[in-house]
Image: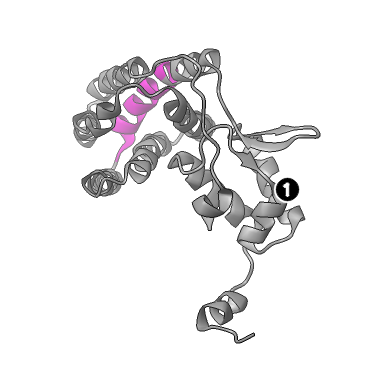
Amino acid sequence: MQTTATDAGRADRKPPTSDAVCQELSRAIHEHRLAPGTKLGEDELAEIFGVSRTIIRTALQSLAHGKLVEIHRNRGAFVAKPTPEEAREIFEARELLEPRTARSAAIKATPEDVAVLRAHIAKEHAALKADDRGLALYLSGQLHVHIARIAAQATIAAFIETLVARSSLIVALYWKRQRALCESHAHNALVTAIASNDGQAAEELMHSHLVDLHSALDLKKVPVQGTSLKEILG
C-alpha cells in the first residue's frame, strides 16, 4: 500500500505525553465538544492519539482528580455529569471566592496584567463573532482564571481553576439562556474596574456577574446524547 504525505507526516510526529492528552481532552470538555456523560474508551482514545493505554489511563486519572472525568469500576471512564446539587454548590463557592479575589486582583494589577486581560476579551469577542461558542465559553472561563492568578493567591487560584472547569460541565447540562454567553459587557466592566485599581467595584461586578450566570441555569436533569470520539477528536 502506498504511503501518503499525510501518513508520513503523522509517522514523523512524536506521540503526545499524558499531559498533552490530558490538556486536549480538558479543552474538548471545556468547549463542549465532549459532552457530559460521554464514554471515554481507553482503546479508542489510544488509537485516536496514537499512544499506549497506559498514557491514556494516566491522562484520565488526572482529569478524574480535577473532577472533569468519572471513573467507574468495570464500566470505564466518562465525562463527569454534575448533579443539580453539585451545580448549586459550585456556583455558590464561586460567588463566595471570586468577588474577593477580583478585589485583590484590582489592587495588585499592573498595566501588563490589564493588557493580557484586554487581549483575552478580544479573543473571546472574535470567537463569538465567528459563532464558535465552544471556544468563546472556554475563553470566558479562562478570563476568570487569569484574574485569580493576578491576585497572586496560588491556593485559591488553583481552587477557582477547578471550579471554572467544572462550571463548563454545568453549563453544558443546565444552560437555559444562550444569550448570556454573548453578554460581554460584564467582562468589559470588570476589566475596566481592575484597570482602574478599583477593588470595591471589581468585587461588586464579579459578584453580580456570577449571580447572573447562576440564574441562567435550569437545574433539572437533562439527557445527553452520546457522540463518536473519533468524530469529536479525530
For the point 60% across and 49% down, the residue is 22
> In the picture shown, does residue 24 fall above or below 154?
below
Residue 23 in sight from this viewpoint: no
> In the picture shown, does residue 228 fall above or below 197?
below
Q: Which residues are magenta?
A: 95-109
Is 99 in the magenta?
Answer: yes
- Left or right: residue 128 compared with residue 210: left
List x then y, in percent, for residue 128.
Answer: 25, 43
Query: Residue most toward the right?
Result: 74
List x then y, in percent, for residue 108.
Answer: 33, 35
Residue 125, picture quadrant: top left
**Magenta stretch, overall SS:** helix
- Left or right: residue 54 compared with residue 91: right
**Callout 1: helix, strand or loop?**
helix
The total number of labels drawn is 1
Which residue carries the number 1 mark?
A: 57
For the point 76% across and 54% down, the residue is 54
Residue 30 in sight from this viewpoint: yes
For the point 58% across and 56% down, the residue is 20
Question: Could you tell me the amino acid type at mark 1?
Answer: Arg
Residue 202, picture quadrant: top left
In this rendered view, identify the residue nearer to me: 210 or 168. 168
